[in-house]
Amino acid sequence: MRVYGGCIEPGGYELENERVTAPCPDCGKPARHHHFERAEGSLNRYHTIDCDHCGHESGYDFLMP
Ligand SMILES: [Zn+2]
């Protein structure tokens, strides 16, 4: 019998991953908001915003090293 990894996935638990359209904090026009969670030792929640109208981007600090 071969065992992969040492992780046990919590049964039936789904990480939040929701994309919604909501007003841009800069220009107030519809922007793409993305709410999601990542399991990185602990569960971290993120909220990113992309606006096609004014180019606003925020919430991407987690991409930094
Ligand atoms: Zn905007």
Image: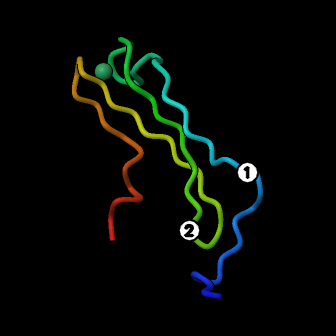
> On the image, numbered disc 2 is attached to which residue?
40
Horizontal and vertical percent for residue 37? 58, 50
Q: CA distance from mark 1 to mark 2?
A: 15 Å
Q: Quadrant of residue 52?
A: top left
Ligand 1 located in image quadrant: top left
Figure label count: 2
Amino acid type at image mark 1? Tyr
- Would residue 62 appear left or right of 27 to someone viewing this image? right
Q: Residue at x 62, y 42 (%)?
A: 16
Label 1 SS: loop
Q: Position of residue 45 (x, y in %)?
A: 59, 51
Q: Nearer the viewer, residue 61 or 40?
A: 40
Q: Amino acid at mark 2?
A: Glu
Q: Image quadrant of residue 32?
A: top left
Read off the residue under disc 1.
13
Report x, y in % for residue 30. 38, 13
Residue 2, horizontal then vertical, whole percent: 60, 87
Q: In the rendered structure, find residue 38 and report the number of the disc placed on it.
A: none
- 19 shown above or below 17: above
Q: Is residue 42 left or right of residue 27?
A: right
Residue in view at x 44 percent, y 16 percent:
23
| Depicted 20 relative to depicted 34: above or below | above
Mark 2 element type: strand
The furthest residue to the bottom: 1
Q: Say above or below: 53 vs 7.
A: above
Q: Quadrant of the C terminus?
A: bottom left
Q: Dividing the picture into quarters, in which one does residue 44 lie?
A: bottom right
